[in-house]
């Protein structure tokens, strides 16, 4: 056993996150941590790394376990080159390298130093560190960071630093690696490289992820649910099957309890009526008082039980028995609600690209010429390596609104229908919203579309998108979690019932129920849909044509 976790209680602010959470990690296991946004997945990682010790319970590691985790902050290493940062943060590298480099000049005939030097040489070779820099550089190429290998860490974007962390983890020789959302913002080549490494590595890896391609590769899934950890042996397919069975059983038990509560309340009313009519002697206790007291005690115990959360994937729901499906629809976990268009725009060509190439002034085009036409209801998936110009193409389309020629359009023409209404879902929240409260941001979104807005509409919108209308309304957007910011993006995306939407990696930061709800809404969406994504499950659900952007040849 590598790690044993026994958390009696963990409270964040006034919110209980964990209560009786128990789990263990074995040698070589590939485990995924999943759960609704806000249940404490990242907090659990911080507890495992020792960054968060404010909890009741224990986390016990086997003696000598080497742990590595992806880092969020890099301020103290900002001047180090990428390769230097990765290599010098590998386990034992810095110590062994120091001995090998400095001891020959100082050890003379000192037997202790000679022994340490010899052992360091053997250990350095055993860890295969003599060629590690070359291997690190090759790994950086997989994430399109080969040219950045000798640049300082401070020059990298946030996304690039995430990939640097993955390379560091891959070469760490750790017993246990903790990786938070590794495939977010990866292109298909980088994702394939990571999945290949994940499948081949011999040590234990625990990932926080809702990437279904990655979930399909794990050996066990632990779902943080109702303040505990529920274990599902196997991969994503196995999880869906087991989750449906467990949730169906939980629903049956929950309905039984609810029926018992209704029955008890009727019995209490009956006991109270009979108590009032009881004509017994004064020296004999009213038996209906005893019955009422007993029933009230049982009712209190049953009503004190917290309502469990329920979610079953749609395909499994369709296979449930009718009575269980009816119960699930009644009690299922709340998911994102997106209004469909009330009426589809009449069939028309909304977008035409003719030999389009994009880029920036004084630079070569990013990709080979593209020609296509999209009508109302068409779907288009855009794929390509990071940096090939996927997002730049989107900006060029948006820049062509109002018959203007976009600055990034180097060659060709972009034609948009005069009645097109385009909204976009982007990877990062616009800075203009960060200093606003969530309620003010929603008000600003509606106002920007010249839509009527009221306190009631804001509260209803918050509820529809999984926010607490009272508790979350005054939170600053800058302080929201990644999942919460993603949901605010969805509010903006559908606010004015657009007839064309463009989504850039929409499943990043969303949990499984929200991803499924988004897919269901987009599948029914009547307008034109353009999406940038390397999520194979999303592409399978949404379908459409596939535009592969290839680098321009000089």
Image: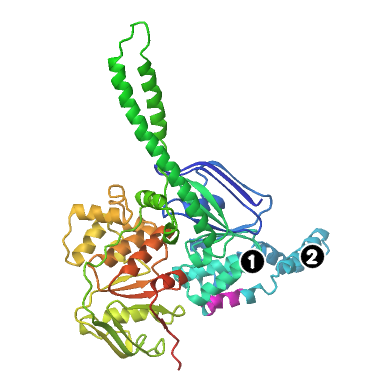
Nearest the camera: 327 or 413? 327
Dot 1 lies on which element?
loop
Task: Tell us which disc is closer to us: 1 or 2.
Answer: 1
Q: Which quadrant holds residue 140?
A: bottom right
Question: Can you see residue 314?
Answer: yes
Residue 179 visible in the shown view: no
Where's residue 175, x and y in %? Answer: 65, 58
Q: Is residue 139 magenta?
A: yes
The 10 Å Cα crowd at callout 1, few under 14, some 14 to 19, many 20 or more, is some
What residue is disc 2 on?
Answer: 118
Q: In x, y percent, where is residue 262?
A: 34, 34
**Few, some or many C-alpha atoms within 10 Å of disc 2 (few <14, some 14-19, many ≥20)?**
some
Q: Which residues are magenta?
A: 136-146
- The image's mark for residue 254 is none
Residue 471 percent coordinates (x, y): 31, 47
Q: Which residue occupies 39% across, 89% down?
A: 365
- Residue 123 is drawn in which quadrant? bottom right
- Of callouts 1 and 2, the N-terminal one: 2
Horizontal side of 465 relative to 18 (left or right) equals: left
């Amino acid at each position: 056993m590598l790690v044993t976790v026994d958390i009696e209680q963990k409270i964040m602010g006034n919110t209980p996150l964990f209560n009786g959470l128990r789990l263990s990690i074995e040698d070589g296991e590939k485990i995924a941590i999943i759960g609704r946004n806000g249940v404490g997945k990242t907090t659990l990682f911080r507890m495992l790394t020792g960054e968060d010790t404010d909890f009741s319970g224990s986390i016990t590691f086997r003696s000598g376990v080497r742990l590595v985790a992806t880092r969020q902050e890099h301020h103290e290493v900002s001047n180090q080159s990428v390769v230097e940062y990765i290599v010098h943060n590998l386990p034992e590298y810095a110590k062994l390298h120091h001995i090998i480099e400095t001891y020959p000049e100082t050890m003379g005939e000192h037997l202790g130093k000679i022994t340490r030097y010899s052992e360091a040489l053997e250990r350095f070779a055993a860890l295969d560190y003599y060629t590690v820099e070359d291997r690190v550089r090759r790994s950086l190429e997989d994430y399109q960071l080969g040219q950045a290998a000798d640049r300082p860490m401070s020059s990298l974007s946030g996304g690039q630093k995430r990939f640097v962390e993955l390379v560091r983890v891959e070469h760490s020789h750790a017993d246990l690696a903790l990786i938070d959302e590794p495939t977010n913002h990866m292109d298909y080549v980088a994702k394939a490289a990571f999945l290949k490494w994940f499948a081949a590595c011999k040590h234990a890896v625990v990932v926080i992820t809702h990437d279904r391609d990655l979930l399909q590769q794990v050996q066990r899934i632990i779902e943080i649910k109702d303040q505990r950890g529920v274990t599902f042996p196997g991969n994503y397919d196995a999880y869906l099957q087991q989750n449906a069975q467990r949730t169906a059983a939980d629903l049956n038990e929950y309905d039984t309890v609810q029926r018992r509560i209704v029955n008890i309340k009727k019995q209490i009313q009956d006991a109270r009526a009979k108590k009032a009519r009881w004509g017994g002697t004064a020296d004999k206790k009213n038996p209906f008082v005893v019955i009422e007291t007993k029933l009230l005690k049982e009712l209190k115990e049953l009503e004190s039980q917290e309502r469990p959360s329920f979610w079953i994937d749609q395909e499994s729901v369709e296979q449930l028995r009718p009575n269980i499906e009816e119960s699930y629809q009644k009690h299922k976990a709340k998911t994102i609600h997106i209004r469909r268009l009330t009426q589809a725009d009449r069939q028309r060509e909304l977008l035409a690209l003719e030999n389009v190439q994009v880029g920036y002034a004084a630079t070569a085009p990013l990709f080979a010429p593209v020609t296509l036409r999209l009508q109302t209801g068409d779907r288009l998936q855009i794929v390509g390596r990071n940096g090939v110009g996927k997002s730049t193409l989107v900006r060029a389309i948006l820049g062509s609104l109002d018959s203007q020629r976009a600055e990034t359009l180097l060659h060709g023409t972009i034609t948009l229908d005069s009645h097109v209404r385009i909204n976009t879902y982007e990877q990062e929240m616009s800075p203009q919203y960060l200093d606003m409260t969530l309620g003010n941001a929603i008000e600003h979104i509606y106002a920007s579309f010249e839509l009527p807005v009221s306190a009631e509409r804001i509260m209803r919108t918050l509820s529809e998108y999984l926010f607490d209308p009272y508790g979350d309304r005054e939170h600053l957007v800058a302080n929201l979690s990644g999942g919460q910011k993603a949901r605010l993006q969805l509010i903006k995306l559908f606010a004015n019932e657009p007839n064309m939407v463009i989504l850039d990696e929409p499943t990043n930061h969303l949990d499984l129920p929200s991803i499924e709800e988004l897919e269901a809404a987009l599948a029914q969406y009547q307008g034109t849909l353009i999406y940038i994504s390397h999520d194979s499950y999303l592409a399978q659900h949404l379908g459409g044509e596939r535009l592969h952007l290839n680098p321009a040849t000089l």
